[in-house]
Image (cartoon, rainbow, N blue to C red):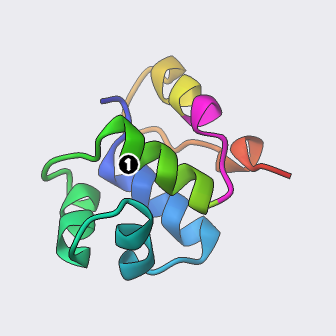
Amino acid sequence: MYITGSDLRKMRLEAGLTTVQMAKLANVKTRKTYENWEKNIGSPSMNQFIAMCNGCQFNSSTIVQMAMERSDVSQQMNLESAAVR
């Protein structure tokens, strides 16, 4: 997946959510699973990713497009352009 752990973390922080809240959005049993994703240990399914985007008020299609278009995964995404108004 083109979405990295730092992307998930940035998305969570910009939405003002905790790891527990993100785990709940992704429908995983513990926050540890979500925290592992932020550390690039495993990754969410597409459905989980979309659920987290919706919960954070971001357009998942826009985020995926930005992730695919960046030349280096270490580049930070501008999530403001993906915010649902």
Q: Is residue 60 magenta?
A: yes
- Decide which of 84, 28 is in the foreground and name it: 28
- At 44% from the left and 77% from the top, the residue drawn is 21
Is 37 located above or below residue 34 in the figure?
A: above
Outermost residue, left direction? 41
Reading the image, the residue beneath label 1 is: 48
Residue 37: quadrant of the picture: bottom left
Percent x, y for residue 47?
40, 41
Is 23 located above or below residue 39 in the figure?
A: below
Crowding near the residue tagged with mark 1, few <14, some 14–19, many ≥20 C-alpha atoms within 10 Å: some
Identify which amino acid the numbered label 1 is placed on. Gln
- At 36% from the left and 80% from the top, the residue drawn is 20
Q: Which residues are magenta?
A: 57-63
- At 31% from the left and 52% from the top, the residue drawn is 5
- At 50% from the left and 24% from the top, the residue drawn is 70
Q: How many marks?
A: 1
In the rendered structure, the answer to whether residue 51 lies left or right of residue 26 reads right
Residue 14: quadrant of the picture: bottom right
**In terms of secondary structure, where does tag 1 sit?**
helix
Q: Is residue 43 magenta?
A: no
Percent x, y for residue 80?
74, 50
Is 31 located above or below residue 14 in the figure?
A: below
Outermost residue, right direction? 85
